[in-house]
Image (cartoon, grey):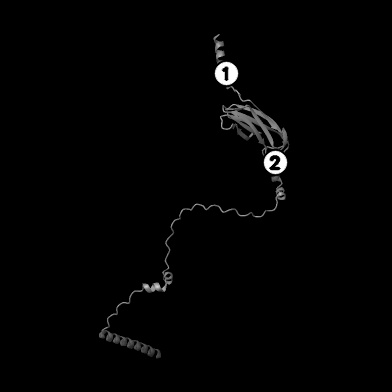
Amino acid sequence: MKKICLFVLMCLLGASLVPIASATIEGKYTVMPYSGVYDQKIMIYVRCTPQVDTEIKTVYVFWDQIQVNKLVSNQVAKTTSYQHLWDIALTPPAGYNGEGEHVIDIWIENKQGEVLKFRWVYEITDGLPPVTAWERYIAAHPEVLERITGPKGDKGAAGEVGPRGAKGDTGARGPIGQVDYDEVWSNVPPSVLDQMKGEPGASGDPASLSLVVAGFVLSVVVSSVIAWLMNRRMVGEDY
């Protein structure tokens, strides 16, 4: 009996640890059209019940497990109520629009984190090959790009000049250069030079008579010595 009671207690305890999902969100959806070509515009209509209440809900749309849209409930005027209906436009994303079946997932989430999920299988009846296939083809046939590339267009007009940038930092001061004084003085106007000249100095005292006589005697002696040397040199050359 004790074992039975212990077993029941463990079962109740284990059950209390298992997360229980209580999806209280009610809604419905419609996808139009049911199928189409790779660039077909698809409309997804999502409605919750009730359509208006005081709780914000969020709808997510996925295409082949890639999120392509996220919308929240619209507030009703300036009240605390929100409207839960969405008209969502969807175009198959590039690279995921190949021919065949694709999965559209629609999730509606409330603020408690509960999620109501819908799934629709959409068929693309005429699609494009994936991007990787184009890359492989171009790599194997590079001449295709040359055939489909047109001539180079004319150069476009220059754009408007942008605003003037901020002033940069002042650079380091350079070394002091040598002054060319000759050039400086040559550029000074004569009138300025005249103003820069000083007054003539006073005349010196006249030389004394003895200095004049001494100078005359010295000049005679020097002249005689020079004449004697020249005569001696000329006589020596005759011999």
Q: State the SS at label 2.
A: helix
On the image, numbered disc 1 is attached to which residue? 15
Q: Is residue 6 left or right of residue 41?
A: left
Badge 2 density bin: few <14, some 14–19, many ≥20, Cα 10 Å: few
Earlier sequence position, callout 1 versus callout 2: 1
Q: In the rendered image of this protein, does residue 89 appear above or below residue 167?
A: above
Residue drawn 39% across and 89% down? 234
Q: Could you tell me which quadrant the N terminus lies in? A: top right
Tag 1: amino acid:
Ala
Q: Secondary structure at mark 1?
A: helix
**210 over 44 or under it: above or below:** below
Instruction: Residue at the far top: name it.
Output: 1
Dividing the picture into quadrants, the one containing residue 215 is bottom left
Describe residue 118's horizontal placement relative to residue 11 as left or right: right
Residue type at tag 2: Ala
Q: Which mark is residue 133?
A: 2
Q: Position of residue 183 (x, y in %)?
A: 43, 70
